[in-house]
Image: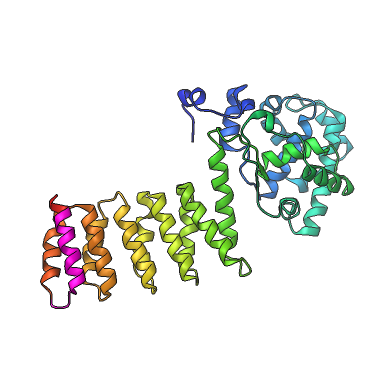
Amino acid sequence: MLTNSQDMVSVVRCHWALHSPLETVYHDQEWGMPIHDDRILFELLVLETAQAGLSWSTILQKRAGYRRAFADFDPVRVARFDDAMCQSLLLDTGIVRHRQKIAACVQNARAFLQVQEQFGSFAAFVWRFVDGQPIQNNLLHRADVPTRTPISEALSKDLKRRDFAFVGPTICYAFMEAAGLVNDHVQECVRWQAVQSEAYLRHVASLQSSQSAQELERRTAVDALGELADIRAIPALVALLHDVDEGLRVRVVRSLRQIGSPFVFDALREALHDPAPAVRRAAVVALGKLPDERNLPVLLELLQDTDERLRATVVLTIGELGNPQALPALLHLRQQDGCSEQTRAYIVHAIQRIKG
């Protein structure tokens, strides 16, 4: 997370985030991250309704006021606001005192509850418009960022049909951007990759419980997480270590290796007990690439494994580590009767690498 004063000015961000420190923090911590929580989605709907014709900076400055005035953005409570409550809000300097916008928030809360009743959640309803996955626009320049799209027009039309107010296509698109239905960070922005990573995390989380997901799609998503090298992917990947698809588990181990953080050590050590030899060998290679001093003792124990191919992989991996502490164990293995000629050749090679 970017917080210090140097980071606030030294990294590239979307142009609108540079207008004020408040907008910078919002941009870095919230904007564009996929939201599936109905309370937060209702908050964004209220704030986007309030913004119409105003700057986003103004709305952020009044965000705390809106939270207080609109019952912590609880749509159930807001839906109960009567005319007297709306009239009192016109005197509240903590919000935008606009009669139609205030009335729209109450009206939208009631419509919001109807959508929840029909679809189970507002999130389920709104995410249908992007097929459940954020649109990655991969924009190069600020001029490429649209203000409305056919999808925002379709969303606007549907919301209006359900009696929502102040939900034109432009407001709907701003809502989609804020809620992460679309990633409109430009590619040079410091947050572009982070938002993409979050999208992949949620995608993999959905795939791991989906029996209908295509095998290729699942494997592609796992590979993408490894390429992004984001430590937030670790929990989702670890959960997939127990998947029934052996090929997927191999890819999970390789993606954990690409992340390369010490936080993946326990997961890789667990993968060494996988029933599939290919997964175990992949875990050995991954441990060898991990910059963690705990890997050598684990690898040395595996020199006594009954799987000859696994032992050979361990020997080669230990050689790449180049740690002299491994020499006694390698020499001992070479003298054992059960050591194959191929493994002995690998041991010689490993010893040569260690000795330099």
Q: Image check: 100 left or right of 214?
A: right
Q: Where is residue 185 in the image (x, y as percent from the top left)?
A: 61, 36
The question of residue 344 being in magenta is answered with yes
Where 314 sits versus 83, above or below? below
258 in the magenta segment: no
Dominant SS type (magenta): helix
Q: What residue is drawn where x is 85% and y is 48%?
A: 158
From this viewpoint, is residue 70 visible? Answer: no
Say left or right for 208 vs 106: left
Which residue: 22% across, 66% down? Answer: 301
| Quadrant in which residue 271 is drawn | bottom left
- Percent coordinates x, y for residue 109 in the rendering: 80, 45
Q: Position of residue 250 (x, y in %)?
A: 43, 64
Question: Residue 112 at x, y = what percent?
Answer: 80, 49
Residue visible at 11% across and 68% down?
332
From this viewpoint, is residue 34 visible?
yes
Of residues 323 and 265, the one nearer the viewer is: 323
Q: What stretch is highlighted in magenta?
A: 337-353
Look at 49% across and 36% down and name the residue there.
1
